[in-house]
Amino acid sequence: MSDPNLTSQIQNPKSKHYAIIVAGGSGTRMRSSVPKQYLLLNGIPLLMHTINAFNACATKPGIILVLHPESHDYWNQLCKEHNFTVPHQLVSGGETRFHSVRNGINMIEDDDAIVAIHDAVRPLVTCAIIDESYECAEKYGNAIVAVKSRDSVRQIRDNRSQSLNRDNIYLIQTPQTFQAAQLKNAYKQVYQESFTDDASVVEQTGVNINLIGGSHQNIKITFPEDIAIAEFLLKQ
């Protein structure tokens, strides 16, 4: 059963597909007093663009939004100000991203569901990528969005740099989508610092990770200039 103190008044319909959108960051690299997920992008908070992207897709997942517990009132106020009515379930984040994701997973009772986990600050993800991730995860167990590196890559070992073959280097994005049973089992583990994303958590249980094509436009808003880039891309 879910804790009623964790949820907002906006609730998800029952669904076989879910999207856990993780938005617990403070956004310190944005040099802004407002966490980056709430910054305006073409007139509305960035986070609303991200939720809209999932809501617009054919898969139509139930949306679970994980926010810092102190941000719930602020988010609800933003929803009122912008007349934002997309159904979603609000959940309190945890100490780390790992714990925040686990809180979101705990809201899903159906072990046969397909669950996408997405960074709140990737608002330019397309429906094509989202829908493909659900289809592939349903067929193969999981689907991790990634793009090939465009740049030359070097690795530091024993204080010396070594060139790597960039054809074998993939940059990981979100959504990262899994069969719920696979995800729930993985998140029973004790947190480790090596858990950099959901794929690394699931992989630790011995499960093979499947990559699918992403987009270089599926950028993560991290620095102030990223807002300008995102606004330009949205206008295209």
Image (cartoon, grey):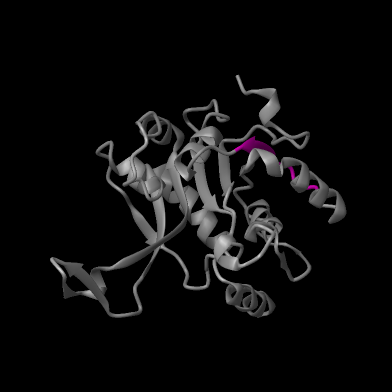
Residue at 47% over, 69% down = 215
Residue 184: x and y, percent? 43, 31
- The answer to whether residue 90 is visible is yes
Residue 34: x and y, percent? 69, 59
Q: Which residue lies furthest to the top in this view?
A: 1
Can you say whether 13 is above or below 31 in the image?
above
Span shown in magenta: 85-92
In the image, is 213 to the left or to the right of 163? right
Residue at 59% over, 67% down = 30
Residue at 42% over, 50% down = 136
Rendered image quadrant of residue 48: bottom right
- The answer to whether residue 221 is visible is no
Q: How many numbered dots are placed on residues in this image?
A: 0
Q: Nearer the viewer, residue 55 or 216?
A: 216
Residue 25 is covered by the magenta coloring:
no
In the image, is 8 to the left or to the right of 174? right
For the N terminus, the quadrant is top right
Can you say whether 77 is above or below 106 in the image?
below
For the C terminus, the quadrant is bottom right
In the image, is 33 to the left or to the right of 168? right
Q: Nearer the viewer, residue 184 or 214?
A: 184
Residue 87 is covered by the magenta coloring:
yes
Rendered image quadrant of residue 201: top left
Residue at 65% over, 32% down = 14
In the image, is 105 to the left or to the right of 75? left
